Image (cartoon, rainbow, N blue to C red):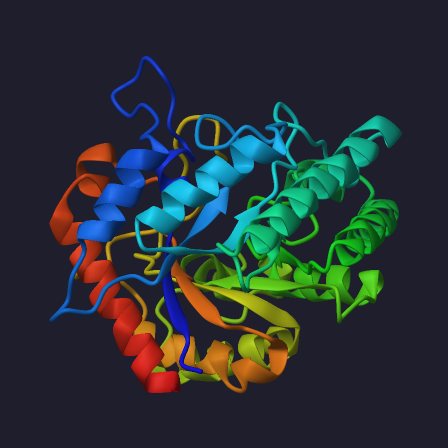
């Protein structure tokens, strides 16, 4: 089966704040924008969801979840991966924090897994994983790296066991703003320490993992220095993807201009820029191919575009979504 192409709904939420120039964009609006994208008659196949307000109440009743699934199905979409509300201030807490924090983290995964199960029973969801991160920053993690690695892995193990009870897998997002996964080496160490490859894997995002190469929050893990050559880039990219690809169970198509960016209360991380941005550092298709080798053997059935922290006027422009869809189609066609 060819990979399905999804659009992420959380760019309408991440970094958005009421009362600012960039308030949250409703799920209905994000669905409509996604539905209207078209490249020579090809459309998005589905959407990936953020399980938090105002798009989704994580404590919603089963009937409410089914009504949401009806709405998404009526838009012509399947539901793929789900983002669990694991952060302090949502349902969860830091995965290497206090006992209460860690318990709340596991609770957030349990809620998400139950919603995932309802969506599968409904028929709107046939594939995808639950996305998590450590919900804590690199500076806090560095205060006692050995102890925090142990706590993080134990929390992921507990969360993985809960997810497996509902037939779900967890994908830990590689992003430089999350402690214990803020470099490719830290991410690999966390996954190996967790030791649940059939249940807890890696979610690779092209924009975020570009910053892994430069060691932005972990200089000791840098694979490239500024001014690198093209040959050096591809050698470094191979090193990173060879290490993390066996763990990769979820994938985000994206572009990065080499900078970091944060909006609202979201910490700075690899900037997502538009698919056709002339400042983009990545050959999107070639880089995606390196992550997606043998994707079917890892249970990957869809790819998703992630445009976190785009300005609202960018998100609300039809040209943005057409360019994103076109880039995603090229990736799908390249990998088969």
| Left or right of residue 121, residue 109 in this image | right
| Depth order, front residue of 77/171 | 77
Q: Position of residue 207 (x, y in %)?
A: 40, 58
Q: Nearer the viewer, residue 248 or 25?
A: 25
Residue 305: tell me if it is visible: yes
Q: Is 151 on the left or on the right of 19, as rendered?
A: right
Q: Position of residue 43 (x, y in %)?
A: 23, 63
Q: Residue furthest top?
A: 19
**In the depicted view, which residue is nearer to us: 190 or 10?**
10
Looking at the figure, which quarter contains the N terminus? bottom left
Residue occupying image coordinates x 80% and y 55% = 165
Quarter in which the C terminus is drawn? bottom left
**Can residue 268 be seen in the rendering of this structure?**
no
Residue at the image position 53 percent from the left and 71 percent from the top: 223
Rendering coords of residue 248 (x, y %): 60, 71
Whether 143 is drawn above or below 200: the answer is: above
Picture mark count: 0
Question: Foreground: 278 or 199?
Answer: 199
Q: As displayed, is residue 41 above or below residue 262?
A: below
- Please determine whether, in this image, residue 3 is positioned above or below residue 55: below
Q: Find residue 151 and report its image quarter.
A: top right
Counting from the top left corner in percent of width and height, residue 175 is at 54, 52
Residue at figure coordinates x 81%, y 66% from the top left: 196
Residue located at (35% from left, 27% from top): 24
């Amino acid at each position: 089966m060819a990979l399905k192409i999804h659009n992420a709904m959380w760019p309408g939420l991440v970094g958005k704040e009421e009362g600012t120039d960039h308030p949250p964009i409703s799920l209905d609006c994000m669905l409509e924008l996604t539905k209207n994208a078209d490249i020579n008659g090809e459309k998005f196949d589905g959407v990936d969801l953020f399980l938090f307000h105002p798009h989704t109440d994580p404590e919603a009743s089963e009937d409410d979840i089914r009504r949401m699934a009806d709405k998404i199905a009526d838009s012509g979409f399947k539901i793929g991966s789900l983002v669990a509300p694991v952060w302090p201030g949502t349902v969860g807490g830091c995965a290497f924090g206090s006992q209460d924090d860690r318990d709340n983290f596991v609770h957030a995964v349990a809620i998400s897994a139950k919603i995932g199960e309802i969506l599968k029973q409904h028929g709107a969801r046939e594939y995808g994983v639950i996305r998590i991160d450590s919900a804590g920053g690199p500076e806090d993690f560095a205060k006692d790296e050995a102890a925090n690695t142990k706590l993080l892995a134990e929390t992921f193990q507990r969360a993985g066991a809960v997810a497996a009870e509902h037939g779900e897998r967890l994908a830990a997002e590689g992003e430089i703003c999350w402690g214990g996964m803020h470099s490719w080496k830290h991410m690999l160490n966390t996954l190996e320490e967790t030791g649940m490859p059939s249940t807890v894997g890696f979610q690779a995002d092209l924009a975020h993992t570009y910053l892994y190469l430069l060691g932005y929050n972990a200089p000791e893990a840098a694979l490239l220095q500024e001014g690198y050559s093209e040959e050096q880039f591809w050698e470094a990219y191979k090193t990173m993807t060879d290490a993390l690809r066996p763990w990769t169970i979820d994938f985000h198509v994206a572009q990065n201009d080499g900078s970091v960016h944060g909006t609202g209360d979201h910490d700075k991380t690899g900037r997502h820029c538009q698919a056709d941005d002339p400042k983009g550092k990545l050959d999107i298709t070639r880089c995606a191919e390196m992550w997606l080798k043998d994707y079917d053997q890892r249970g990957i059935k869809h790819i998703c575009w992630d445009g976190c922290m785009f300005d609202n006027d960018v998100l609300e422009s039809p040209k943005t979504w057409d360019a994103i869809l076109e880039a995603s189609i090229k990736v799908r066609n390249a990998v088969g």
